[in-house]
Amino acid sequence: MELSECIENRRSIRRYLDKPVDREIIKALIKAASDAPSWKNSQVSRYYVVDRPETKKAFLPCLAEFNQKNVKDAPVIIVSTVVKNRSGFERDGSYTTHLKDGFQYFDNGLQVENLCLKAYDLGLGTLIMGIYDHEAIRTFFAIPENEEVVAVIGVGYADIEPEQPMRKGIDEIVHFKE
């Protein structure tokens, strides 16, 4: 599949088929994520995966109620974290950019986008969620304190083909210096 097709046609999926996703496919998604660039090759993203129905049932209360409904049929849920205080920092712990610790989230976003585009390329749908109980997720997976939960991603075979939401026109978002 062409990259342009993935970019233009990937959508947030909120209904999934009752069809499991093989762990080798999940690993391929994580591999695509890890191929994204990162600050000084710091590679700060980490992934925690739920892919068994009984485990997912125990995990769902970690999400906001509306997100629980959105991914109740998703066979896979991936939690993306970042190792804190590496991306955008010098070895002595000082900030390198005016974004301070914000660059770690930029790096993670690049990885999550790669993951979602690879999922679409492999015939899967995804939903990136940002509303959740981060402490409950930390406890559920025993995530170390030096990592921060950034995104939760539902993954599975789509049972819906949503239309693209309205996008701003290019002339509204681009500014050329004359």
Image: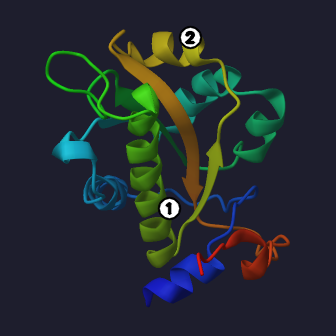
Q: Is residue 29 visible?
A: yes
Q: Which mark is residue 116?
A: 1
Q: Are marks 2 and 1 in contact (CB under 8 Å)?
A: no
Depth order, front residue of 48/89 = 89
Q: Residue 3 vs residue 124: left or right?
A: left
Q: Residue 169 vs residue 11: left or right?
A: right
Q: How is the image coloured?
A: rainbow
The residue lying at 31 percent from left, 62 percent from top is 32
Label 2 vs label 1: CA separation? 25 Å
Q: Split into 4 quadrants, where in the image is the N terminus? A: bottom left
Residue type of the residue flagged with mark 2: Glu
SS for callout 1:
helix
Residue 61: % across, % down? 69, 21
Image vertical order of residue 46 relative to residue 117, above or below: above
Residue 7: % across, % down? 55, 77
Residue 24: % across, % down? 29, 58
Quadrant of the image occupied by residue 153: top right
Q: Which residue is mark 2?
A: 135
Image vertical order of residue 46 relative to residue 24, above or below: above
How many neighbours does mark 2 have within 10 angstroms: few (below 14), some (14-19), or many (20 or more)? few
Quadrant of the image occupied by residue 141: top left
The residue lying at 48 percent from left, 59 percent from top is 113
The residue lying at 29 percent from left, 34 percent from top is 87
